Image (cartoon, rainbow, N blue to C red):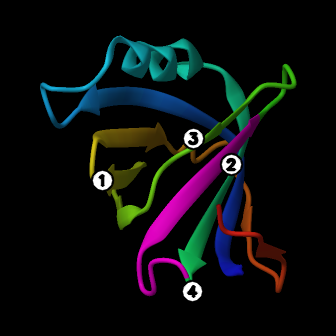
Amino acid sequence: MAKIFVAFRDMKLKSVEMKKENQSENWEWRKDFIGIPGTLSIYKSECKYPGEWFAYLKCTDGSWLRTGYGKFNISNNEITIKTKNSIYVFEIDRKGTESWADEKAEQEQ
């Protein structure tokens, strides 16, 4: 199980880039989520990859994006998740974004 660290409403994926050039053609689907608003939850792994982070973006259109495990950083108006294969940047809209944390857990995949 992974514990939720923080969740944000009204978030958007600002950008995603490939870290490794040897990715498969399937990597590009991540870009389809750029600009779609949703709730972003940040989790910390406790079992599978202890101490690493992953994000889950549940979009308002019903779609969802789950990142791989990696490093997590909040700075200025951005949240960055750097995984083995990708770098995700989520935009924090200070006007409408709410954050909260609770004790929900997510099954690690």
Q: Position of residue 73 (x, y in %)?
A: 34, 65
- Residue located at (65% from left, 21% from top): 36
Cα separation between marks 2 and 3: 5 Å
Q: Amino acid at mark 2?
A: Thr
Q: Contact, CB < 8 Å: mark 2 with mark 3?
A: yes
Q: Which residue is mark 4?
A: 47
Instruction: Give the label, 1 or 4, closer to the camera.
Output: 4
- Residue located at (84% from left, 27% from top): 60
Q: Which residues are magenta?
A: 48-58
Q: Contact, CB < 8 Å: mark 1 with mark 4?
A: no
Mark 2 falls on what kind of element? Answer: loop
Cα separation between marks 1 and 3: 21 Å
Q: Position of residue 28 (x, y in %)?
A: 40, 14
Q: Amino acid at mark 4?
A: Cys
User: Residue 93: which numbered mark, if any?
Assistant: 3
Q: Which residue is mark 1?
A: 82
